């Protein structure tokens, strides 16, 4: 008989990028015959979207997101409500600090206490042997740790989709609450090898790499087309303003605009996300504002529509001396859209990402280095000429996507449960 597992997952709706990983991993395990329970925010997912074989246990949330919605902030803070990026960044940093992360953060306060109580009851009632939690939000790990205190024999799988702070020697990693959290985990997993190595190097614990698979994207009907007869270079989502840059992309586009009249008339640079102000500033900086359009945060169905209708989807990432492997969840959405991906790395080359992109015959990955500008311009021009010829661009092959089947990427998790 296969063991039962409890997912602590504040977010669980499959159309939320923060919930995609937990949703599809839990669905995959249920399909494989495991008994799967979800402990999450009440009303965070419509009943009809809960996969077969999964038992969802909702906890009412009275945290900052609930309060913001009461005061009219739809789905949290976006740049439509708060114009200062510094204020948004300050808020993000505050919610990383102990004890504010557990008191004020997503899933904090009243929700945290109720989730622990309900989780303890579920473990007893269903004789659950494993508990799984994933950062972010950090409160999911806090809830899992507190549940495990009641059941020392319970095996805890602690997953990381990100790092907490950017350098391995950051003093925050040696704070008591972080160390106790990590050393209480029986198993650790991470979304990429780079992030797995980061956590392993700090705490000298083995960390398994557990990649993301493909989401089921649900674009809006194509009769609602946001642009017509345009060669669209698209970016959807957040910009990490301290780390991400795209200078050579904008310089390459400007070069093509100056040298190719048809390209100038056809190109459209599209952005949608919470950093619209920052993106618009980039357009002004590089003189591209007349070829660009931008909008604030949009529903995920609209984002999927943009990704599937665009000719190029842009992904920005970075490396540091301590960290590689920042793939971002947007990468998997772009894969599902099958359009060419243009990835720029701020910093040194990333061997893990390069290996992934080498399997995609229509995409490119480069560092944001001036020496790569001409290569990038040639890539864009090639795709533009393909599109100009028959309104099509090469698609990512279905064969390349087979490795992103959740049953394959989820094998490390299954091995833990069956060990």
Image (cartoon, rainbow, N blue to C red):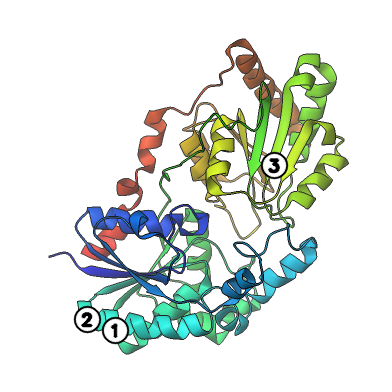
Q: Residue at x 70, y 37 (%)?
A: 270
Horizontally, residue 369 falls left or right of residue 102, namely right
Using the numbered discs, state the Cα–Cα distance from disc 2 to disc 1 in whole angstroms. 6 Å
User: Please, which residue is most extreme toward the bottom here?
Assistant: 150
Q: Residue 324 appears at what percent x and percent y?
A: 58, 53
User: Residue 271: which disc?
Assistant: 3
Q: Nearer the viewer, residue 186 or 106?
A: 106
Q: Are marks 2 and 1 in contact (CB under 8 Å)?
A: yes
Which quarter of the image is occupied by the C terminus? bottom left
User: Residue 125: which disc?
Assistant: 2
The image quadrant that residue 402 belongs to is top left
Say what secondary structure mark 1 lies in: helix
Mark 2 or mark 3: name the one nearer the start of the chain: 2
301 shown above or below 372: below
Using the numbered discs, state the Cα–Cα distance from disc 2 to disc 3 in whole angstroms. 48 Å
Q: Nearer the viewer, residue 45 or 117?
A: 45
Q: Nearer the viewer, residue 200 or 114?
A: 114
Q: Residue 217 appears at what percent x and percent y?
A: 45, 42
Q: Residue at x 58, y 32 (%)?
A: 224
Q: Residue at x 79, y 51 (%)?
A: 277
Horizontally, residue 123 falls left or right of residue 241, namely left
């Amino acid at each position: 008989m296969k063991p039962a597992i409890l997912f602590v997952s504040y977010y669980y709706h499959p159309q939320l990028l923060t919930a995609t990983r937990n949703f599809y991993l839990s669905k995959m395990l249920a399909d494989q015959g495991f008994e799967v329970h979800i402990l999450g925010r009440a009303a965070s997912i419509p009943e009809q979207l809960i996969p077969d074989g999964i038992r969802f246990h909702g906890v009412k949330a009275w945290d900052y997101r609930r309060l913001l919605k009461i005061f009219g902030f739809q789905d949290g803070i976006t740049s439509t409500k708060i114009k200062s990026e510094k204020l948004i960044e300050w808020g993000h940093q505050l919610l990383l600090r102990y004890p504010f992360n557990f008191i004020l953060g997503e899933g904090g306060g009243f929700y945290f206490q109720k989730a622990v109580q309900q989780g303890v009851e579920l473990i007893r009632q269903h004789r659950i042997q494993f508990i799984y939690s994933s950062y972010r939000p950090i409160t999911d790990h806090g809830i899992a740790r507190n549940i495990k205190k009641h059941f020392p024999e319970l095996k805890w799988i602690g997953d990381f989709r990100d790092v907490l702070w950017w350098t391995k020697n950051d003093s925050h990693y040696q704070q008591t609450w972080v160390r106790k959290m990590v050393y209480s985990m029986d198993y650790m997993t991470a979304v990429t090898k780079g992030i797995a190595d980061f956590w392993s190097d700090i705490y000298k614990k083995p960390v398994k790499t557990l990649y993301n698979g493909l989401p089921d994207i649900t674009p809006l009907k194509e009769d609602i087309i946001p642009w017509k007869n345009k060669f669209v270079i698209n970016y959807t989502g957040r910009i990490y303003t301290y780390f991400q840059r795209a200078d050579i992309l904008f310089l390459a586009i400007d070069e093509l605009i100056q040298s190719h009249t048809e390209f100038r008339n056809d190109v459209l640079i599209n952005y949608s996300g919470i950093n619209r102000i920052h993106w618009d500033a980039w357009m002004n900086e590089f003189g591209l504002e007349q070829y660009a359009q931008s909008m604030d945060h949009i529903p995920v169905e609209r984002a999927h529509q943009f990704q599937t209708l665009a000719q190029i989807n842009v992904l920005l990432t970075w490396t540091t001396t301590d960290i590689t492997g920042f793939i971002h969840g947007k990468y998997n959405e772009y894969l599902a859209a099958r359009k060419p991906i243009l990835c720029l790395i701020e910093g040194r080359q990333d061997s893990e990402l390069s290996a992934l992109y080498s399997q995609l015959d229509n995409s490119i990955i480069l560092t944001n280095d001036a020496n790569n500008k001409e290569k990038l311009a040639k890539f864009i021009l090639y795709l533009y000429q393909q599109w100009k010829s028959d309104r099509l661009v090469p698609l990512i092959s279905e064969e390349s996507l087979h490795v992103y089947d959740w049953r394959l990427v989820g094998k490390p998790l299954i091995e833990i449960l069956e060990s």
